[in-house]
Amino acid sequence: MVPACLFLSALLLQTPAIPPQASMEKERGDNLVASNNLESAMRAYDEAIRLAPNYVEAFNQRGVTQVRLGRMEEAVASFEKALEIDPNYAMAVYNRGFALKKLGRHEDVVRAFNHYVALMPEDASGYFQLAEGNYACDALPEALAAYERFLAMEKNPSQTKKIEHAQKRVADLRTKVASAPQAQPQAPAALAPQAAPMPPKDVSPSSVLFVTPERESLSRAKMAEGVTLRAEGKLRESIFALQAAVQANPNDPTALHELAESYAAKEYFVQAAVRWEKVLAMNPAPAIRAQVQERLDEAYRQMEARGIQRQSGATAPNE
């Protein structure tokens, strides 16, 4: 996760702007999916892709729809096309891994989620899926390490079933690993694409960089997308969009604030607190400072209630 003040993913700069008609078709597809009209949604995504062959989000959403239709091989192909365009598009990396899991391609699952946790080290679900893949490959020490990482990170009560599953696996694996007379099989090596630079970190307040009008526009669009996705309850997707907003314009405290709000909505209070601390360090207007301080204090209270210590001096990982 290349110094943030110097580097913005080349893909953000090189990918052509999406024509308005293509965006409308993709939005139409999203609405059709929401109403469970999946075949019509497929046609809308296909039209969006015809109009904009480098439309990463349309390829990803087509793949998601194909998963819902049970067309796993086709879904993998859609996600892989998205990753040809943007090798670090985390949603497609995760979704491809999920589809591969449905196909029983467990070694490829491990490779996919090794890539995902490198891109999104704060998302506990990535470690759970990595653990599941390693377990299916009989790579027991690697599975144990990933399950333990998941349990250390996941505090959301809505994930109780996964937590209990991981706890049982950990208890079983600790016994098996401790008593194993020979080395366990090694998990497949992570095979992140060679052309995939790691996403940049948030920019520190002292590292203000020049932002072109195009990047400001991209940041605003991604921020609006992220806020909308959060309102729809699509929190992981919201975080991805808002991370892209921060990448495009690291100088904008509003993008960081909205990213913190999505982390808090997902109950990732440590990650939220780190971003709100950074917003305060950017010396926002007094009214904004008061609002952010209030949200930061609430994040601290939630951390304390969960027995999570403040991470003094913590810095935000790569967005």
Image (cartoon, grey):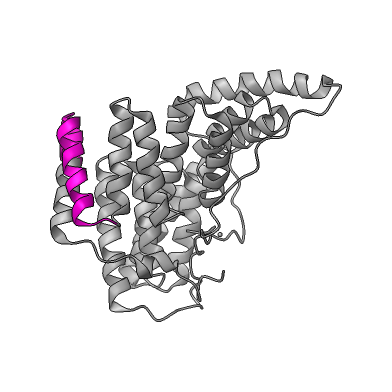
Q: Position of residue 149 (x, y in %)?
A: 63, 37
Q: Is residue 64 left or right of residue 271?
A: left
Q: Is residue 75 magenta?
A: no
User: Which residue, as the protein is rendered here, is positioned at the far bottom?
Assistant: 210
Quadrant in the picture for the N terminus: bottom right
Principal secondary structure, stretch drawn in magenta: helix
Q: Position of residue 297 (x, y in %)?
A: 45, 53
Q: Is residue 50 magenta?
A: yes
Q: Is residue 189 left or right of residue 159?
A: right
Taking the image as drawn, is residue 248 in sight? yes
- Residue in front for this viewpoint, 220 or 194: 194
Q: Is residue 277 above or below residue 271?
A: below
Stretch in magenta: 30-53
Q: Is residue 216 above or below residue 273?
A: below
- Residue in front for this viewpoint, 106 or 233: 106
Task: Count the labels in the image.
Answer: 0
- Residue in front for this viewpoint, 249 or 134: 134
Q: Position of residue 47 (x, y in %)?
A: 17, 47
Q: Residue drawn 49% across and 51% down?
A: 271
Q: Residue drawn 18% across and 37% down?
A: 41
Q: Is residue 230 left or right of residue 173?
A: left
Q: Quadrant of residue 287?
A: bottom left
Taking the image as drawn, is residue 267 in sight? no
Q: Position of residue 158 (x, y in %)?
A: 43, 28
